[in-house]
Image (cartoon, helix red, strand yellow):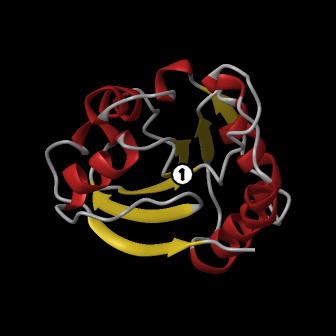
Amino acid sequence: MAERTLVVVRHAKSDWTQAVPDEERPLAERGRRDAPGIGKWLGEHVGDLDLVVCSPARRARETWKLASAELARKPPVQMDERVYAAGPGRLLTVLAGWPDEVASVVLVGHNPGLADLVELLCGERREIKTSAIAVLRWAGDWVDAEFVKATLDGFAIARG
């Protein structure tokens, strides 16, 4: 049975000072400082990644762009509208659609959905602050995520 690795990443700190729609909010200065730390941590603790699935929100895209610049090998990125403002049920639907040959995925998104997803999959409640990273692993396929208890194999909050 294949092992799956899901790396949940909450976007870095966003800028609330601009009068723009929520989906267009950019990163704040602190977010731009912290986001590269996400990539450094992933490179040191997770290893090669097969895929990144990212919310199309500007702050999520900017977070991944800055984080991925720190990786030796950059995985392909898919923007997925369903990740924006998604709850755990919709996020599980997103996971279930990933191909079996993909073993490790970074999911870049938002709270409260990410925190709820982590709790649902591993049974542990974690505060998923901005720039937080949670690494979940389980044996099985992506569609099994809802039914097999995952292990929380790593957790960090990247700060610049």
The image quarter containing residue 88 is top left
Q: What SS does tag 1 mark?
A: strand
Dot 1 crowding, Cα within 10 Å, few <14, some 14–19, many 20+ = many
Residue name at image x 58 percent, y 78 percent: 45
Q: Is residue 126 left or right of residue 120?
A: right
User: Camera-side residue: 99 or 9?
Assistant: 9
Residue located beneath label 1 in the image: 10
Return the residue nearer the eye: 63 or 151: 63
Q: Quadrant of the C terminus?
A: bottom right
Residue ID at (24%, 63%): 125
Q: Quadrant of residue 97?
A: top left
- Asked if 2 appears above or below 55 in the picture, the reply is below
In the rendering, at what x and y percent does residue 69 appear? 86, 58
Q: Position of residue 121 (x, y in %)?
A: 23, 53
Quadrant placement of the N terminus: bottom left
At 40% from the left and 28% from the top, the residue drawn is: 86
Tally of marks: 1
Q: Amino acid at mark 1?
A: Arg
Residue 81 percent across, percent down from the top left = 55, 19
Residue placed furthest toward the bottom:
44
Q: Identify the residue at image location x=61%, y=25%.
A: 22
Residue 50 is situated, as x and y percent measured from the top left of the image, at 61, 49
